[in-house]
Image (spheres, rainbow, N blue to C red):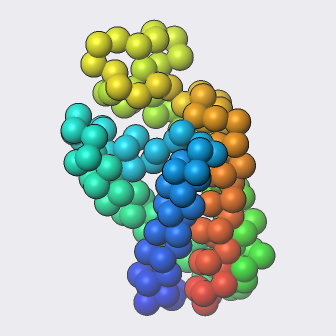
Amino acid sequence: MDWAGWAVFGIAATVTLTTIMVAAQLAGLSRMDIPLMLGTMFTDRPDRARFVGFLVHVVNGQIFALGYAAAFAVLDRSGWWLGALFGAWHGIAALVVLVPLASGMHPRMATERSGPVLHTVLEPPGLLALNYGRETPAVALIAHVTFGTILGAFLSP
């Protein structure tokens, strides 16, 4: 397995994914703020939450990059197109399963069923994170496909 590639390009791919998501948010294409969503699980201070959330997202990205590297090793092949395919699957899974489930375990996020209460500061993302804007699913898919493309292009099986 390509351990050096995983260490370097896993971080590069994760930072790129996060940059795309934050840039889309700043451009008004999406209101989904992954660092804030992750960070507010640990603190209620927004500025600190974004920093903590960014670090959590980098760690999560490294874990996913390890999965990509393992898959490339098992398949004994890699390539940008295979990475992009994995990234599309990863993005769909995140939008359909991971992000909507966040409200069930997040201490500061409202849920679809119970609605907002005094301690919640984030609205629930909903299916495909559509509560954060119509373009959010497209932005998330582009970001995840880019993540996979980087890993597929630069990791060797």
Q: Residue at 34% x, 21% y: name it.
A: 120
Q: Residue at 28% x, 55% y: name it.
A: 51
Does residue 74 appear anywhere in the picture?
A: no
Res 84 quadrant in image: bottom right
Relative image position of residue 68 (x, y in whole percent): 58, 71
Relative image position of residue 88 (x, y in whole percent): 71, 58
Q: Camera-side residue: 123 or 93? A: 123
Q: Compared to 141, does 10 lie above or below?
A: below
Q: Camera-side residue: 87 or 119? A: 119
Give the total number of marks visible in the rendering.
0
Residue 100 as seen in the image, left or right of residue 141 = left
Res 73 quadrant in image: bottom right
Relative image position of residue 94 (x, y in whole percent): 59, 46
Relative image position of residue 29 (x, y in whole percent): 63, 45
Residue 122 as seen in the image, left or right of residue 144 = left
Q: Compared to 126, does 34 lie above or below?
A: below
In the picture as drawn, the residue positioned furthest to the front comes out as: 27
Question: Which quadrant of the figure contains the C terminus?
Answer: bottom right
